[in-house]
Image: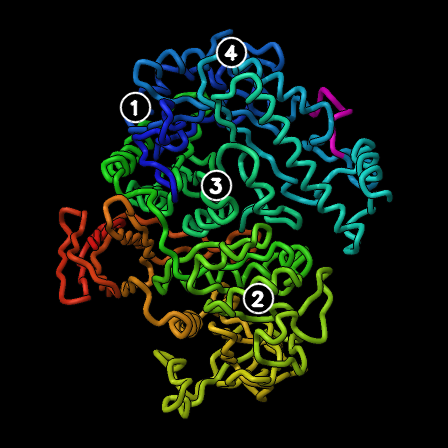
Amino acid sequence: MIHPGEPAPDTAPAGSAEPLPWYRRLLVGIEIGPTGANDRDDVYMARATGREFVANLLGARAQYAVIFMKDHDFAYYPSRVARPCPNLGGRDLLRECLDEAMPHDLTLIAYCQVQYDTSSWRAHPEWRMRDSDGRDIPGRLCYRSGYLGFVQACAAEMMKYEIAGFHFDMLDFGFAPPYGCWCDTCRRDFERAYGQPMPPGETWDQAWDRMLDFRCESNSSFCRELEAFVKSRRAELSVDFNYHGYPPFNWVEGERPVQHAAPGDFVTAEGLPFVFGHANPSLLSLFMAGARPGGPCQGVTSRSIYDYHDFTVRPAVEMKWEAFTYLAHGAQCTIVDKANYDGSLDEVAYQRIGQAFAEAQAKAEYWGHTPVPEVGLYYSSRSRDWYAREDAPRYFAAFAGAHSALLQAHIPMGMIMDENLSLDRLRRFPVVFLPNAAILPGEEVALLAEYAAGGGGLLVTGLAGMYDRFGRLQEQSGLGELLGARMMRPVTEHLDNYVRLPAALADGPGGFLLADIPPDWPMLTWGPVAAFEPEGAQAFGEILVAQRSQDSQWSEHMSPHAVVGPAVFINQYGAGKVVYLPCAPDAAFAGDYRMPEHRLLLRNLVRCLNPEPEVNVDAPVNVEAVITRDEQRCRLLVHLLAFWGPATVSAAAFPQGRRVLPPVMERALPYRATIRVNLPFSGAAAVGPEAELSVSGARITLDTADVHEVVVIEY
C-alpha cells in the first residue's frame, strides 16, 4: 500500500536497504481461529493441522495469515505459561504452520487474546477487575495488574518462533456495564494521580472526567508496555491491537479514537459481521485513517454472514465488495475464518475468498494512493462522551447520517478528529462538516475560525457548540460570530420537526437549496432543533415544530404546526463561508424516518460551499466514489464500489425487537455513472475489461456491471 508521502510498495525508503514491513507491502490476508473451547472430549481442534491451514491459505491467495496461538482457554503450541490445547496431543500447531508456510514466503502473525481470558481469570483472583462495590467483574482482567506480566511471558515464548508479529485482541473496556475497574490498585493509582478518591460510578462531574482519562490511560499504558516488551526482544516484529472504541461496535463513553489508535504499528478494526454492528467498511476505513493520519490501517471482515462462529459463507462478490472498499481507502483487508469444531476448514469459504483476493492482487497498482477528499467529517469525542453520554445515538446518529448522505451523494470525504485537530488538518479539506458537534471547546472554535477566515467552508448542523465541556446547555453557541446568527431558544423537547423551503427562494440567492427538493413542502427532519435569528448571516427557509396531542399514541409523531425560526443561515466569514442548519437532517438520515431529501439538502449545501470539485460523480446511490491521486504517474483514480442487495428480512421474531438483518449480495448488476472532470485532462480509461467508457469534453460516461470499477484519468 502507498500512503501519502510514502514510497511504492515494492521499494524501500530512500537510502535504506531494508524492505518495507509486511503491513505496508501486503494487501490481503486471512485470520484462522477455533470455534468453541473444550477439554472434555477428544474432538475439539483434534484435526487442526498446519498443512491444511497453509494449503487453504495458499489456495485463497492470502498474502499473510493471523493464526490463533493463545485464546481464552488454551495455547496451541507447547506453552509452559498457558495451558496447551489437550486435543493437539502435544503437537505444536505454530511450528507446523511455520514449516508449511516458509517455502511459500507466507507471512504468519501470532494471535494472542488478552481480555476474556477465562483461564487466567479463574487462576488469579488478584488480577480481576472489580466494580465500584468491590465485586469481581466476570471475565475481566485489570490492565494495571500482574496480568501484563503473564501476557508478556506468552509473547516471549512465541517470539522464539519465526513469526512476523503479534495481533493482540480484545483491548476493550467491556461489552456491558460496568466499564472500568475499581480494584485496590486502580483506586490507589487514581488517588495518587488526582488527589481524590475514585468516583463510585458515573457522576458526570470533574471526578468522572478524570475517571474517563484514567480508564483510557490504563488501557493505553498496557498496550505501550506490551509493545515495548516485544520490540525490546525482537524489534522487527510487528505489534497491533484490535481497535475498540470505534462506531458502532463497543462504542462506550471514554473510548477515544486517537488515543486508542496510537499503540502498535498500525490500526486494525472489525467491520463485519452483523453482530458487531455491521459497520460500513467505508466509515470504518475513514475513521481509522482519521484517528491515525498517514498511518497504516487494516479492516477486518468475516466469511460468515451473521457472526464469526456461524458456518454460513458469504457470496464471493460480497466479500470482494467489502475487501475492495478497504483497499480503495488505503487499508489492508483481513477476512476471518473460524475453523470447524474439530479444527478442519471449509474449502468453499477459501475458494470464495480466493476469487476476491486474486482480483485484489491483480489490481495492486490502483490501491493505496493519496486520497482526494472534498469534505472533512468532524468527529467530536467530547460530544460523544459528555453530550450523548450513555445514549450514544444522541450524537452518533448525526455523524453516521452525515457519512451515509455524503457517500450516497458520491462526495469523497475524510475524517477530522477533535483529539488531533490542527489548522493543517482542516486545510486539507475544501469543506469541513460538523454534524451536531454539541461540545466545541474554545481552542477548537479558534482553529475553525482561522480555517474559515482563510477561505475554508464550514457546514454546521444541529446543536453544535451549544453545550459546555460537561454537557450543560449554554445561553449561546460557542461558535459565536462564525454562525452570523444568535440563538433565541433551543427547541429540543420533541424530535418530530420540519424544514420548509419556500418556492420564492427559486429567484434569489437561496435558489440552490431547492435542487431536487419540493418547494413549500414541510420536510420531516427527525432530530433536535433550535430557534436562531440572523446577526449578519443570510437566512433562508423555515423550521417548524410539530403539533402536540395529549391523547394519542402518536403524540410524538405529529404533523407540522408553527414556525420557530429560519432553517438555513449562510454567513461570509473572512475569505470563507459558514453554512448553519439549526436542525439535524443528518441525524434524520440515519434514523427510522429517513428520506432522500435529507441527503439532497446536505448535498446542496456542500455544493454551495464547494461548487466545482475536481471530480464530480453521478451514479446510483448504492455506489460509493473514492477518489485518489497517483502522483508518480500523474493520474486520478476514481474507484466506484457498488453494493446490490435485495430487500432484507425484518427480524420480528427476534426478542430484541425490530432488528433488521443485512442484505446479502449475490451478484453485481449493470449501472451507468457519469463523471465530470473540472480540470484539464488528456484521457480516461476503465480498468474492467467489460466496462464501456466514452469521453465528451469534460464528461466521462461509464457503463459497467461489477462491484468495483476504476476509472483512470490522465492529466
Looking at the image, which residue is at 60% across and 76% down? 481
Tag 1 secondary structure = helix
**Label 3 belongs to which residue?**
270
Q: Nearer the viewer, residue 344 or 705?
A: 705
**Closer to the N terminus: mark 1 or mark 4?**
1
- The answer to the question of whether label 1 and label 4 lie on touching residues, with beta carbons closer than 8 A, is no
Residue 145 shows up from this direction: yes
Judge whether residue 93 can be spotted in this image.
Answer: no
Tell me the SS state at disc 2: loop
Residue count near mark 2 (Cα–Cα under 10 Å), binned few <14, some 14–19, many ≥20: many
In the image, residue 408 above or below residue 329: below
Whether label 2 touches label 3, CB < 8 Å: no
> Could you tell me residue 303's position as x and y percent?
38, 37
Disc 1 residue crowd, few under 14, some 14–19, many 20+, Cα 10 Å: some
The amino acid on which the numbered mark 4 sits, given as a three-letter code, is Lys
Whichever of callouts 2 and 3 sits on the residue coming sooner in the sequence is: 3
Label 4 vs 2, first from the N-terminus: 4
| Above or below: residue 525 compared with residue 218 | below
- Residue 296 image-quadrant placement: top left
Q: Is residue 398 left or right of residue 364?
A: right
User: Which residue bears the numbered disc 1?
Assistant: 58
Secondary element at tag 3: strand
| Residue under the point 23% across and 62% down | 673
Span highlighted in magenta in the image: 121-129
Q: Tag on residue 601?
A: none
Q: Which residue is mark 4?
A: 160
* Tag 4 near tag 3, CB within 8 Å: no
